[in-house]
Amino acid sequence: MEDQSVYKETKGRALIVDDAPDTREIIRKLLVYEGYEVITASTGEEGVEKTEAEKPDVILMDINLPGIDGAEALRRIRGINPIQCVIMLTAYATLDNAIQALKEGASDFIKKPFENEHLVHIVNQTLEKYLILKEKEKLEEEVRRLSITDDLTSLYNHRHFFKTLESELVRRKRQKTSLSLIMFDLDNFKNYNDHFGHIEGDRVLKKIGEIVRQSIRSNVDSGYRYGGDEFAALLIGATRDQALHIAERIRSTIEEAGFEKITVSIGLAEFKEHMDMERFVKSADDAMYMAKHSGGNRVQTSTR
């Protein structure tokens, strides 16, 4: 059969895992002709490796393979990608084999020897199923992201702050690392809002969110809109002195952002052994109010 992949748009990526070269080649040509990009492997271990590296949409895998068999390879593949769609190929045309494959998480099975049209039909059906599962997973992730994110600033929200803090306190106790908290609110924000209007006020809050994200360490620290014009940042593994450097960066960047009379009052606390979650947050909060009542536009560290 002539390869005609050049004439058709690639519809998906397929991985064939089979130790029989003739079988691999027949299936490869069928799927290339159907418009698939095709990857092949001859052992279960190689199939698992290529699943992780190549991220196929559909996998066709023989149950009987050298090394780890198809059932074990299937379990490992599902560990890499829980929604991965795998079609098992079996030369044993028994109901027991089919049921066992489906119990292990296979999407479908095809008996050898197979009819070409039947195989292509099953692969196309399985691809459709996988694309639906991927879209569902993407939508669920977006719903989750929106539930923990503040719409305006794109920082995490107040609810997620306490959930993350609780987790970080558990991790800190286990790993014996430092943990610091910055809390700040905007100086003169009410007057700014009254004078320039809420649309301009929202622009300021959005810009503050950008400054927080740029000032903290990506994939280490986390920034939050705590409420209104109040913000927070959890600094993982940061001592008081390290946190002070980040806090000062936030303060100076906001001061230089060009918003008329908008500055910030920042409170900073490092977690101490005698604290619980409430006392930790309160110590940063109290330091923030000390900064505010001392004239604003400054960083105040907790004395507790």
Image (cartoon, rainbow, N blue to C red):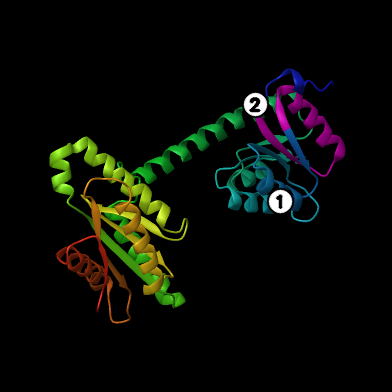
- Residue located 12% across and 41% down the image: 194
Q: Identify the image quadrant of the N terminus.
A: top right
Q: Circle 1 sits in a helix, a strand or a loop, which is it?
A: helix
Is 136 or 103 nearer to us in this picture?
Answer: 136
Taking the spot 85% from the left edge, 41% from the top edge, the residue there is: 20
Label 2 crowd bin: few (<14), some (14–19), many (20+), radius 10 Å:
some
Where is mark 2, residue-wise? Answer: 11
Residue flagged by tag 2: what amino acid is it? Answer: Lys
Task: Please name the amino acid that badge 1 sits on.
Answer: Glu
Q: Is residue 63 above or below residue 181?
A: above
From the image, tell me which residue sits under label 1: 49
Residue 115 visible in image? no
Q: How far is the residue under mark 2 from the one under mark 1?
A: 23 Å
Q: Is 115 placed left or right of 274 in the picture?
A: right
In the image, the segment drawn in magenta is: 12-37
Q: Is residue 26 magenta?
A: yes
Q: Position of residue 162 (x, y in %)?
A: 29, 61
For residue 105, say whether it is visible: yes
The quarter of the rendered structure image containing the C terminus is bottom left
Count of numbered circles in the view: 2
